Amino acid sequence: MSNRELQALKERYVAAGVASPNEQFADHATNAELWDADGNRMIDFAGGIGVLNVGHRHPKVVAAIKAQLDKLMHTCQTVMPYEGYVNLAQKLSEVAPVKGHAKVMLANSGAEALENAIKIARAATGRTNVICFDGAFHGRTFMTMAMNGKAAPYQTDFGPMPGTVYRAPYPVPYHGVSEDEAIRGLMMTMKADSPAKDTAAIVLETVLGEGGFYPAPTSFLKKLREICDENGILLIVDEVQCGFGRTGKMFAIEHSDVEPDIITVAKSMADGMPISAIIGTDKHMDASGPNSLGGTYTGNPAACAAALAVFDVFKEEDILGQSQRLGEKLNARFTQWQEQFTHVDNVRCFGSMAAFEFVESKDNRKPMPELAAAMTKKAKEKSLILLSCGMYGNSLRFLMPVTIEDEVLEEGLAIVEECLKEVGA
């Protein structure tokens, strides 16, 4: 079917709240290139929102999924367990930098991972409250909507959010929130709203995703670890977007040497297959009673096979090294644009988790979301998939596959540069 025919069906049958505004429909893709239903080629700098660190349809992952489908598609692992689940749990336990020996629960999505992390934290501590941070994005279920640090569009129209979720400032010095101010705000939250004795967990993204690709400073993470240790609070880091090699390490938290109690991962762990994981210290993970955790499809055999293949790809193709080198290339180009264009500022590349933002001037740093919107629109016209993000909607984020070929990367960056000139950056 053509793009036009599919668009007509979408308008008739797909709920407006979930329908993409994009009137092109993906037909097939390879690594960082995608073709729509009309045969038009596009370069993918979005990676399914950080899902495709090893590229569209990596051959090793595809082969692993096909082999698994010839053996087993589903049993529900709580009814009849299977090898892939326990093998993947072992792999994750061995690489995740949590405190002590790690155990693992597999789920289906990032939001589901966060939901279960909170359940586990409450069971382990006997407390109810959760403290999150401004700018955070943790998901679209009710608990994770409450945890998000940005109301629109995620909470819009959906009524009251669950209680016992509280918020503190996230340190973004560029926008006026220093690390000291963030800590002061956290202590005030614990004083005014969520006393330590009632707080089960402090939850943060090691690098804000939807919130703008701002990494938490190492000293800030270490201070959080101290606060949690002093007060019997669990430290949960959300690595759904920044994990699995995006920052040049398997987990972004590894840049700080801080060991959290629980890590949540999803997105690029299975190269597009729906799976997520909660990885935590064994005594916490075992805190709830029998049959208290689970789900019909959690840890699906085909998704487990894909995730295990991703581990092989990371090792065989030096994905972490590739991520670091990609980040260096992006940083060099972004720095050039920051010098060249009046409204481009605050270049940041944490490995290949890269972004910059549009501001009225480099002096007043007033956000210009209209330029970011114009850039993504213009890029699409030139067959480049590009995403914006940020509390103010003024940042461009780059999530192309880490495995992108040099010539495709250069072609895409050239399009970005053309767009910067055309939108008046």
Image (cartoon, rainbow, N blue to C red):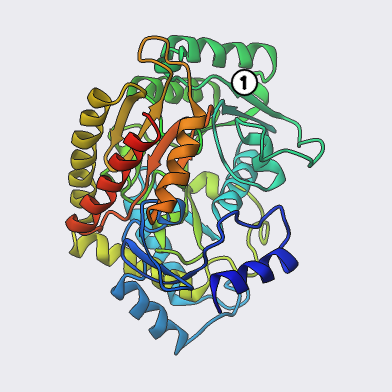
Residue drawn at x 32%, y 52% is 95
Left or right side of 38 for 330: left
Q: Position of residue 387 (x, y in %)?
A: 45, 44
Q: Quadrant of residue 344?
A: top left
Q: Quadrant of residue 247?
A: top left
Q: Nearer the viewer, residue 403 or 164?
A: 403
Mark 1 residue crowding within 10 angstroms, few (<14) / some (14–19) / many (20+): many
Name the image quarter holding the N terminus.
bottom right
Query: Would residue 208 be visible to someone looking at this image?
Result: no
Residue drawn at x 33%, y 52% is 400
Residue drawn at x 33%, y 46% is 246
- Element at label 1: helix
Left or right side of 290 for 304: left
Q: Nearer the viewer, residue 25 or 192?
A: 25
- Circle 1: residue type: Ala
Which residue is label 1 attached to? Answer: 196
Q: Nearer the viewer, residue 355 or 383?
A: 383
Q: Position of residue 40 (x, y in %)?
A: 40, 68
Tell me how many marks there are. Answer: 1
Q: Position of residue 72 (x, y in %)?
A: 50, 85
Q: Position of residue 367 (x, y in %)?
A: 48, 22
**Which residue reaches farthest bottom?**
70
Residue drawn at x 59%, y 70% is 4
Name the image quarter holding the C terminus.
top left
